[in-house]
Amino acid sequence: MRIKEYQYKPDVLDLLFKKEECSDLTIKQIDTAFGKDENQYVYKGDIFLGIVVNAEKYYSGLEVKTNGLLTISLAPAIHKCAVIELPSVYDFQKSLNEIIKDSISDCILICERDCEQYEVEKYKWGAKKANAQVHQLFKFLYDGSVQCPTFLITR
């Protein structure tokens, strides 16, 4: 099932990674009635993941180095999109998990409940607290029964 907008979504949900480390990844522009849309849309297989962004300036306060990393504003943080339908939370979660697993070097996931309102907790992939934050994020996306977490996870 595909949707137009997620009911529960964070202000920021970005993924930074090396594109060449991920298989089955496509970046394309969409043709509309008005010509090509200016955004670059990222797909893992046929699942829409998000939109390529140039967000380097946003990460300076978090001390995130974006050199050579593809930066995507992920589907749940995108506000209503007339051009495409968003994937179900289940399909999105599955595709995101594949990218995280494929990324053997740099892979950064940033989630903010309310942009710049709370301290961003920093974790390393594989740590129990990092896993708990990701689990809480998906629980929030599925049904909103928990508060959206604010975190940054890196290798």
Image (spheres, rainbow, N blue to C red):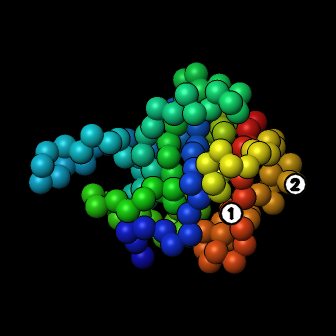
Please tell me which of labels 1 and 2 falls first in the chain. 2
Q: Which residue is mark 1?
A: 148
- Kindly identify which numbered label has been placed on residue 8: none
At label 1, the amino acid type is: Cys
Residue closer to the observer: 6 or 98: 6
Residue sitting at the far right = 128
| Residue 101 can be seen in this image | no
**In which image quadrant can residue 86 be found?**
bottom left
Residue sitting at the far front = 117
Q: Secondary structure at mark 1?
A: loop
Q: Secondary structure at mark 2?
A: helix
Q: Residue at x 59, y 27 (%)?
A: 66
Q: Residue at x 51, y 72 (%)?
A: 7
Q: Which residue is mark 2?
A: 128
Residue 33 vs 103, above or below: the answer is below
Q: Position of residue 15 (x, y in %)?
A: 58, 43
**In which image quadrant can residue 79 be found?**
bottom left
Q: Quadrant of the C terminus?
A: top right
